[in-house]
Image (cartoon, helix red, strand yellow):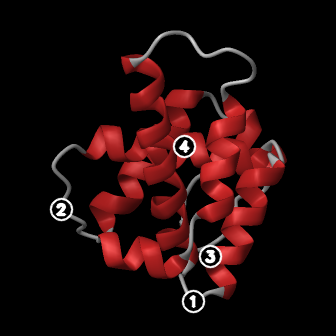
Amino acid sequence: MDRYDPEEVPDASEWNALDEQERIDLVEEYHHAARVRLPNATLHAVIHVVVENQVALGVPAVIAAMQRLHHEGLDRHETLHAVGSVLIAHMQRLMQSLPPTGNPNEAYERELETLTAAAWLAAG
């Protein structure tokens, strides 16, 4: 895999064959070439990579959210950002609280289930 386009689903086997830094570099290269100005290009790329990793691994809640948001009118790049925003908020809560009891991913999955394109667009 030698290029990344957030509007196209990367082939899971090709994506998974890359190491994390190669994935981050590809995402950063895409945004640089697209002249997207970002306050922290590497952090932005890392979030893309984490969500793409979840897609490539077939995480059901992420796949369902991506499909739903796309059907609600978001393009794929926007859906990555919307899911990434839920991921970041979830991680921040995990880091600021006592260790959760049970599966911490359940809260993330519930948040993804309630995410809508309208809510994402209103927050932006």
Q: Label 1, on which residue?
A: 73
**Mark 3 neighbour class, 10 Å CA radius: few under 14, some 14 to 19, many 20 or more:** many
What is the crowding at mark 4: few (fewer than 14 residues within 10 Å), some, or many (at least 20)? Answer: many
For residue 100, above or below residue 29: above
Q: Nearer the viewer, residue 40 or 20?
A: 40
Closer to us: 47 or 3: 47
In the picture, measured across the screen, residue 20 lies left or right of residue 30, that is right
Q: Residue at the spot x=80%, y=46% of the render?
A: 59
Say whether disc 4 or disc 1 marks the residue closer to the N-terminus.
Answer: 4
Residue positioned 77% across, 47% down in the render: 56
Q: Are marks 4 and 1 in contact (CB under 8 Å)?
A: no
What's under tag 1, amino acid-wise?
Gly
Give the SS element for disc 2.
loop
The residue wearing badge 2 is 37
Judge depth for marks 2 and 3 and give the one in front: 3
Q: Position of residue 89 (x, y in %)?
A: 42, 41
Badge 4 amino acid: Val
What is the CA distance from the residue labelled 4 to the residue labelled 1? Answer: 22 Å
Alpha carbon separation for disc pair 2 and 4: 18 Å
Residue behind mark 3 = 69
The amino acid beneath tag 2 is Arg
Picture coordinates of residue 88 (x, y %)?
43, 40
Q: Find disc 4 in the rendering and name its residue.
A: 49
Residue contact at pointers 2 and 1, CB within 8 angstroms? no
Report the Cα–Cα distance between label 2 and label 3.
24 Å
CB contact under 8 Å: marks 2 and 4? no
